[in-house]
Image (cartoon, rainbow, N blue to C red):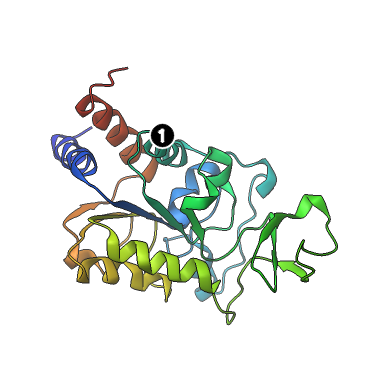
Amino acid sequence: MTEGLKARIRKLARWIYESKYPVFFTGAGISTESGMFDFRGPDGVWTRQEKGLPPKQMEKPLSQMEPNRGHHALAELQKLGKLRYLISQNVDNLHLKSGIKSEILAELHGNAFKARCQICGRKVDKSMNLPKCMCGGRLVDSVVNFGQSLPRQELEQSFEHSRKSDLFVVLGSSLTVTPAADLPKEALNNGSTLVIVNRDATPFDSRAHLRFTEQVGEVMHRTVKQLKGLMGLYE
């Protein structure tokens, strides 16, 4: 690990330690270590599509993928009381699988393993094979496809928590898909500190207070270890 990376990790750990309202935002880049593909990377899904190349095949089905260092680091922050809210563009279920509580998680693009009630918005596991929701509403796939609206309640909550944040950390997102990509702007406009961990450039790089191009898993694993030291929780 370079001295520059060490210094940036120390700074991020210090900011999380001092933060009263840390909010995290994740994109496909946090799940690449688990075997998922990203979208805007050099060999990403959309990049290949734009080049006329066929999509890559995943090595294993989504149901067999497990949370990686990045997911576990966020779950650890939750235990340490340093995760007020988590907003995700991912549908892979890995945040819930890692132990993130559903009440502090907004899955803006849905969840491949859950159905959503068209009336009350409740989400249930597809494996339950329920014909209807408890309220009587019809259950449909929760995954949001292109052209469809994002779940209103979760989107509103995401904007609310972004406005309240004093530290807004982006992990593995190109920040090009709106309205989700408007959330960092909302945070910045309300005085929050912006940190971006993403391999490729984003439209917010010039406004970020701290920038990492290293792997999300490495950055977050080392940051949480540094944070525990600040909190006196030595391993």
Q: Which residue is label 1 attached to?
A: 79
To which quarter of the image does residue 148 belong?
Answer: bottom right
The residue lying at 44 percent from left, 49 percent from top is: 30
The residue lying at 71 percent from left, 66 percent from top is: 141
Q: Secondary structure at mark 1?
A: helix
To which quarter of the image does residue 208 belong?
Answer: bottom left
* Residue situated in front as seen by the camera: 80 or 169: 80
Q: Is residue 203 visible?
A: no
Pinpoint residue 78: horizontal percent, then vertical percent: 41, 39
Pinpoint residue 28: horizontal percent, then vertical percent: 47, 56
Pinpoint residue 132: horizontal percent, then vertical percent: 82, 65
* Residue situated in front as seen by the camera: 178 or 198: 178
Q: Quadrant of the N terminus?
A: top left
Up-down: is 63 above or below 147? above
Q: Is residue 214 visible?
A: yes
Give left or right: position of 133 versus 74.
right
Give left or right: position of 25 versus 38.
left
Tally of numbered discs:
1
Up-down: is 18 above or below 27? above
Up-down: is 186 above or below 29? below
* Residue situated in front as seen by the camera: 103 or 208: 103
The residue lying at 52 percent from left, 70 percent from top is: 153
Residue that lies at the very extreme toward the bottom in this rendered image? 147
The residue lying at 51 percent from left, 51 percent from top is: 103
Pinpoint residue 127: horizontal percent, then vertical percent: 79, 50
Q: Residues within 10 Å of mark 1 (few under 14, many from 20)?
A: few
* Residue situated in front as seen by the camera: 221 or 160: 160
Residue that lies at the very extreme toward the top in this rendered image? 235
Give left or right: position of 175 versus 75.
left
Residue that lies at the very extreme toward the front in this rendered image? 135
